[in-house]
Image: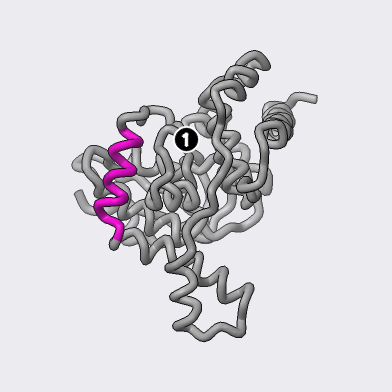
Amino acid sequence: MASKFGPKFAVKARFVPDWNTPAQMKNATCVVEDSNGWALMLEMHNEIFLNQLSESANQWHWIFLAQVLKEDEESLFAFESLQQRNLFALIKELPSLGPKKAASILGKLGVEGVRALLFGENPKMFKVAGVGPKGLAQFAQGLQNNKQKFLPVLEANAESSIKAETPHLTEDQSKKASRSEAPKSRITLSPALLKGLERLGISSEDAFTLYQNIVNDGIDLSEMDQAALLQKMLMKWGDRGVRRAEFEGGV
């Protein structure tokens, strides 16, 4: 099947509230208007980015696209950054995945989660709906088996961060620094913490999502204890509840 849109790499687009329903967003799809007036249906599995678009409705954003063609349909997978788009292109080629699972994994884990698994983080630390522990373990193994393909994409962001923070480094020094930098150790979700959250009405799946959102926010968890982590997660849960109430017309 040939593409209906032609090659699409990125579009400047805006979220149109009247074209989107909570059900669509819950299913990781949204409709945006591009700068040429075209309406595009996008698959967007990054909940944080999707919320950002909906909360800044009618503002223009660059959205990176990956087109997936099948015999009878064409899907547009949307990403916040070029790095995420490039990771998706690699992940979907791993065994037993495909584009939808690849987008779902990347949306839940984020770039930092993928990097952590590549460097040996326990897959049981993460949870992705529809994938399961065995699937995540296979994904982690696939990352490590293809480390040389993933490292350049993952290092691109680390290298630019190091250059921004330490402009006195030469280009060669920056590359060496980014390659030698492994992710910091992070506190894990203990069974006791998960049980405590369940008593408060927060499921294990939501708990892992909250944890990953905190990691994606760039918060350093290397020195945090369980009590401090619990406080962060409850604050994040409260913020999410407020956003949902506002979106659904609540008080």
The residue range painted magenta reads 135-147
Q: Is residue 227 left or right of residue 110?
A: right
Mark 1, Cα crowd under 10 Å, few <14 / some 14-19 / many 20+, is some
Quarter of the image where one finds residue 251: top right
Image position of 245 with respect to 139: above or below = above
Q: Residue at x 25, y 49 (%)?
A: 93
Q: Where residue 60 appears, x then y in whole percent?
A: 61, 58
Q: Where residue 20 appears, x then y in whole percent?
A: 56, 36
Q: Is residue 65 left or right of residue 54?
A: left
Q: Residue at x 57, y 68 (%)?
A: 161
Type of amino acid at the residue the image marks with label 1: Met
Foreground residue among 21 and 105: 105
Question: Disc 1 marks which residue?
Answer: 125
Q: Magenta includes 195? A: no
Q: Where residue 96 appears, x then y in whole percent?
A: 23, 38
**Mark 1, secondary structure of its residue:** helix
Question: Is residue 104 visible in the rendered structure shown here?
Answer: no
Q: Where residue 11 appears, x then y in whole percent?
A: 48, 60
Image position of 178 with respect to 210: above or below = below
